[in-house]
Every structure is written in structure tokens, then in C-alpha cells.
Amino acid sequence: MELFKNKKNINANKKQKMFAKPEVPTGLCIKCTGCSKTIYSKELDIYNICPECNHYFRISARDRIKTIADKNVFVEFDKDMHAKNPLGYPNYEEKIKDMKEKTGLNDAVITGKCQIYGKDCVLCVMDSKFIMGSMGSVVGEKITRAFEYATENKLPIIIFTASGGARMQEGIVSLMQMAKVSLAASRHSEEGLLYVTVLTDPTTGGVTASFAMLGDIILSEPKALIGFAGPRVIEQTIKQKLPEGFQTAEFLLEHGFVDAIVERRDMKKTLSTILKIHKK
């Protein structure tokens, strides 16, 4: 009887394996949130755009730099700057460590000097994958230093924003960065130097309320979410229904908050043209 039982179990296991769903390796395919189609990851190029519906996936800071800066000319600033825990927020150090391992970044922005089609500039690129691109002391300090370098060396500065706002784990220290960066931007402007912001999805909170909206020229990627508070918070506050498409790049362009919406593949050429026009 035991022999027949074992044979029965073996046959059952064979059937189970035969009809089991094949395991798909992690990262092989992704589902587009724009058209809901499953896309083979290798179909996406460095621009990270859906080949079916042209939906923009979020792009890492390092990949963004590759699409904008000339090859092998980007010189990174303050590469080893790390966040501390000024308020003793529980488990903050562990969260930072985890983010470093997952993203390969030390914080939510990369800053440096580069050339765009041979034209010198300072470039700052925020990364939403690092605690939603939140602005803490390191983000504020790195962008401030980038402005100071650009001012001292009479260079234009370009900042790609992508942020959920101020970093709550750093409280008032995080909020202070809004004023600090804005002051550095003001000093850069007083020298008659060019500042361009490129708003990407999402740009919200304290970043929107400070340096993101201070650019001499403000560009955006298509359909980017741009705002301060979220739509639900606003509706609950003013007790009114918001217009359709509120807080999208297209809505802001229509109402004069954005100068132009630029396709990701055209961004380098557009920035190069702006730098050429404003060359001192």
C-alpha cells in the first residue's frame, strides 16, 4: 500500500509541475501605467519611454545625465556627502542605508559640471527613487553649492526637479533648505546668469515652493505632476472640485506657470539652444 501511495504522490507532483505557471525573471517585463500593456524591458531605451503609447516612465538621475551631458565630461560635485539624523528620527539611518543599496546613490540629487553640445554649465538632477526625491539637508546643501560654483565661475545652471517635497524625517532642518537654496539662486541671478529648471514627474511640496519655480526659463516634461499640496488636500480645504487636468504640466503651461513642454528625446537639443542664445 505504501508503494502505491508514493507512486500516487510522484504522479501528482509531476502534474503540478507540468501545469504550473512559468516563473518570469524579475525585471524582464514591466506593465505600462499609460496603456496597461506588458512591455519587454529591453524594448525601452535609455529614455525610458513606452514604445506603445509614449508614456514616460521615471528615469534615474544617472541615466538622465547620460541623455543630457556630453559623453565622459560630467564631473560630479560632493559625491560623498551623506545625510545624518539631526532630529534622532527613529530608523532613519536604516532607511538611508537601504536607499543607498537600492539606488547606488548617497542621496536624492546628483550635482556637477558638464557640457551640453560643447557648452559649459552646471547640472543638478534629482532622483525620485531615493525617498521620493525628498529634499533634506544633503539635497539642499548640494544644490546650494552647485549654485555657488556656477556664480563664482559665471556659468549657467540647469536643475531637473523630481520630488515629493521636504523630507519629514529632518523636520525644520529640511524646511530651512528652501530658503537656503532660494538665496543661492537669487545671488546667481544678481550676477545676470542663466538658471533653467526642468520639472519632471512629480515635482511637489517644498521643492515646488522654492527653487523649482525660480528659473529664468521653466521647462517641463509632458504630463508631469507639478504642484504644492495634493489635489485631495486642496479640494478638502477649499471645498470645491478642481478642474480636469489640474496640476499637470499642460495645465500649468496654459496658465503661464511653465514656459514650454519639451519631449524627453528633444531635451538636450532644446537646452543647448537655450544655452547658445543666452551665452554671455
Image (tube, helix red, strand yellow):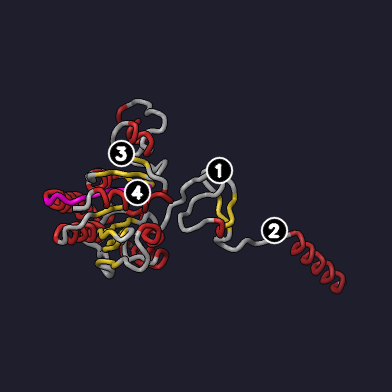
In the image, 172 versus 160, the foreground residue is 160
Mark 2 sits on what residue? Answer: 21
Badge 4 marks a residue whose secondary structure is helix
Which residue corresponds to mark 4? 270
Nearest the viewer among 126 and 260 is: 260
Q: Main secondary structure of the magenta part?
A: strand
Label 3 and label 4: CA atoms lie apart by: 15 Å
Residue under the image location 24 percent in, 61 percent down: 138
Q: In the structure shown, which secondary structural element does the residue marked by tag 2 occupy?
A: loop
- The residues colored magenta run 191-200
Q: Secondary structure at mark 1?
A: loop
Above or below: residue 229 compared with residue 272: above
Sequence-earlier tag: 3 or 1: 1
| Disc on the earlier residue, 2 or 3 | 2
Residue in view at x 37 percent, y 65 percent? 71
Reading the chain from its start, which is encountered first: label 2 or label 4? Answer: 2
Q: Position of residue 254 (x, y in %)?
A: 34, 32
